[in-house]
Amino acid sequence: MADLLNNPGKLLTRALLLAVLGFLIIGPMSNILIWAFAEQWFFPAKLPTEWGFKFWERVFRPRAGAMEAMWNSISIALLTVVVSMALAVPAGYALARRSIPFRAVAMLLFLMPQAIPSVTVHQSIGQIFYMIGLNGTIPGVVLVHTLQGLVFAVWITSASFASVDKDLEAAARDLGASPGYVFRSVTLPLAIPGLIASAIFVFLGSIDEFTGTFFVGVPDIQTLPILLYTASMQGSYQIASITAIFLLIPSILFMVIVERFLKADVAAKIGT
């Protein structure tokens, strides 16, 4: 602290960087909050001329579809977590504990959906799902969300198992424990924090997913990101902002939980 006080230039630089960072984070969120409670806001007014909860009441009307979209988003996200983790736990364990040929290639394959533009990937998936009858269905949307979720699920799950001390497993086996008992009683409990963090990342990725839902689910499946997009395109910025708040709340809460569970030793193993 004394060093900063003796160096005003360094102190000013840090203050400016913090101010810019705060503006980039708080600025958009402040705009969302203002629009969520603005009833009238026309140019050239700097702030809304009327405030209230009129648009919140519209959002919660049964015919507005917001509640249905919210429950769809939550249901799809939870199902995506179940499917992704069911695939990621055995895959992550095998990648972390077994000698697999071309392991690095296998890990990179899970990144491919992120490496290719999402519009291209989801448009192709939408065409395939249309031919097999999965377009406009919950299972179809869950599958396309799982494709994205496996990136986080497999990489973080693999890192979680890799961070477990092998000597603890060896000690359990030396005492006569079977491989299945070692996994249930030693490996899995120690890897649980990382698995929880992995599931949270999958959940957040699913609940915020727009492109996959748009190409596979619309118009039969409505989620909060689809509702936000539709409201924005119609110029209903209040509705869009209220929807954005619904999406922000779980993201902020769960990221705090992730910071609690995703420990440094697990994070250091991601991708190794």
Image (tube, helix red, strand yellow):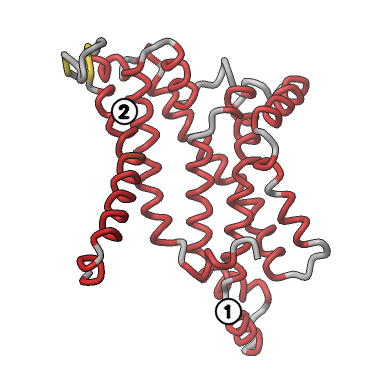
Image quadrant in which the N terminus is located: bottom left
Above or below residue 199? Residue 186 is: below
Residue at the image position 33 percent from the left and 44 percent from the top: 20
The residue lying furthest to the right in this view is 101
Secondary element under disc 2, as helix, strand or loop, is helix
- Looking at the picture, tell me which residue is in the foreground, 261 or 104: 104
- Looking at the picture, tell me which residue is in the foreground, 115 or 128: 115
Secondary element under disc 1, as helix, strand or loop, is loop
| Residue 98, image x, y percentages | 74, 69
Q: Which residue is mark 1?
A: 165
Residue 95 is left or right of residue 207, and the answer is right
First along the sequence among labels 2 and 1: 2
Above or below residue 154? Residue 269 is: below
Mark pair 2, 1: CA separation: 46 Å
Residue 11: which disc?
none
Question: Which residue type does callout 2 highlight?
Answer: Ile
